[in-house]
Structures are given as C-alpha cells and as structure tokens.
Image (cartoon, grey):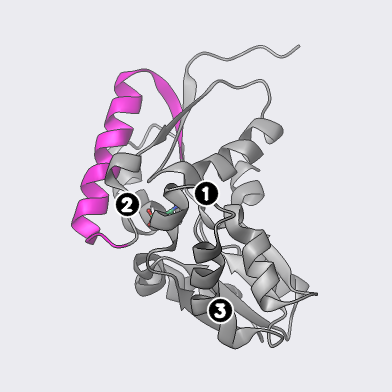
C-alpha cells in the first residue's frame, strides 16, 4: 500500500537547483506528494544579504503552510544556512529539513584527502559552514571554493555552452590533478558535475547532499 497521509511536502530553492534534491526525495519517498517552488525570479540567493534570503525563505514557507504543507524541505544550502533555525523557531510543529554541504561523507570516504567545497559566498561565509568543517572535516585538507555567478549562469540554461566550462575552469582550474574529492555545496552544481570533472581530471570523487537530505 502506498497511501498518502494528507498534506504535501513543500520543497524550495532559489531556482532550478532544488530539482536535484527533489529527484532524490521522489526516489526515497515515492508515496508522498511534493510541491516544488523554485524562486528563479529572485535567484541567486548566494549573492544576496542574509536579511533578503531570510525574508524570501519565510515568505515561501508561509505560503506553503497556508496551502496545507505538512513538512518543508529547504533544498538550498544558502537558505538553510541563513534561515533554517528561524523557520524552525517560527513553526515548531512542522518538520523542516535543510541541506548542508556533504562534507561528512566526503571526509569519511577520503580521510586524508584534499576536498574542495564548492558553494555560494553566503554558505561559505556563515558560521554553520565553519562548524561543519570543525565537526566533520577530520584530517582532510578542506578547501572552500566560492563560485559567485555560477548558480545564476546555471539558471540561464544551455549547460553545454563553452562559456560555462570556462567559468568552471576559473573557479577550480588551479586544482586540476591536485584534489581527491569535490563537495557540491550548492544544489545547482550537480547539473555541471560533468564540466567540473572535465576541468579537474579523472579520479575525483563527487559528493552532494541530495540523497542524505532525502533520507
Ligand atoms: N541552490 C542554492 C544553494 O544550494 C543557491 C544558489 C543561489 O541562488 O545562489 O546554495
């Protein structure tokens, strides 16, 4: 039996990136109803102020709850870093699940490796990220790589265009052949994993938080 238990799960991101998490959610919880909101009109969040990201996130969650959501998934690392705590405080009866860069599985798989954490400037600036590195970075050489402009470029589509690989080269080209793993710490980045792999060279392992969030 695959009965739906009333209400839907509201999933949101600044834009299309959250679809990478939605894919994992649908595969983990095939019996649930999901509604996805990608706030492409206001993307990218990763280059906004914290107050702006907080206000946008609260607005989306408020609308989901007014429409009958029984749970919320913040499918955005940036919005999770900025707003998860405030949202949980404001809605204590509602399960609110966030996403964070998948450093824990990366450090587990590559205990002495060099691991790049690609994410937005906001995600890498906030204390939540530094706590994550202290808690789970272990013996890894953890290298934060902010990628300003990348989520906005992914929003525009045409992911096979040559400008995109050049953009990726600008962020990570200096690490080609010198890293063991990459944490995709923004939900937009799984859509350019192939381009990142092409720049960094063979043998690099990738980690993203979609499946862990779904579980
Ligand atoms: N997809 C979002 C994240 O996971 C943010 C991208 C953006 O809007 O800057 O951080």
Which mark sits nearer the N-terminus, 1 or 2? Answer: 2
Q: Position of residue 2 (x, y in %)?
A: 71, 14
What residue is rendered at 47% in x and 42% in y? Answer: 16
Q: Quadrant of the C terminus?
A: top right
- The local secondary structure at tag 3 comes to helix
Mark 3 C-beta closer than 8 Å to ligand 1: no
- The local secondary structure at tag 2 comes to helix
Residue 83, label in figure: 2
Closer to viewer: mark 1 or mark 3: 1
Range of residues picked out in magenta: 47-73
What residue is rendered at 47% in x and 17% in y? Answer: 7
- The local secondary structure at tag 1 comes to loop
Pointer 1 residue: 158
Q: Position of residue 198 (x, y in %)?
A: 69, 70
Q: Position of residue 71 (x, y in %)?
A: 46, 30
Residue 215, placed above or below residue 183: above
Residue 164, placed above or below residue 86: below
Which mark sits nearer the N-terminus, 1 or 3? Answer: 1
Residue 91 is at least partly visible in this image: yes
From mark 1 to mark 3, how far is it between C-alphas?
Answer: 20 Å
Residue 172, label in figure: 3
Q: Please tell me whether the stretch drawn in magenta is mainly helix, strand or loop.
A: helix
Write down the quadrant of residue 49 in the picture.
bottom left
């Amino acid at each position: 039996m695959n009965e739906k238990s009333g209400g839907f799960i509201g999933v949101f991101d600044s834009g299309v990136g959250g679809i990478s998490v939605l894919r994992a959610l649908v595969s983990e919880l095939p019996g649930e109803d999901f509604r996805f909101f990608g706030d492409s009109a206001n993307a990218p969040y990763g280059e906004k102020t914290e107050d702006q990201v907080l206000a946008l996130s609260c607005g989306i969650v408020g609308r989901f709850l007014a429409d009958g959501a029984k749970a919320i998934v913040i499918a955005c690392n940036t919005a999770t870093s900025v707003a998860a705590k405030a949202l949980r405080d404001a809605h204590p009866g509602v399960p609110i699940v966030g996403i964070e860069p998948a450093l824990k599985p990366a450090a587990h798989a590559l205990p002495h490796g060099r691991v790049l954490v690609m994410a937005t400037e906001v995600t890498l600036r906030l204390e939540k990220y530094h706590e994550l590195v202290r808690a789970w970075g272990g013996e890894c050489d953890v290298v934060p790589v902010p990628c300003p402009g990348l989520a906005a470029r992914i929003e525009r589509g045409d992911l096979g265009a040559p400008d995109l690989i050049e953009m990726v080269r600008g962020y990570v080209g200096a690490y080609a052949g010198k890293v063991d793993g990459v944490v995709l710490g923004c939900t937009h980045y799984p859509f350019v994993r192939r381009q990142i792999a092409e720049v960094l060279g063979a043998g690099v392992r990738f980690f993203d938080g979609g499946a862990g969030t779904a579980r």
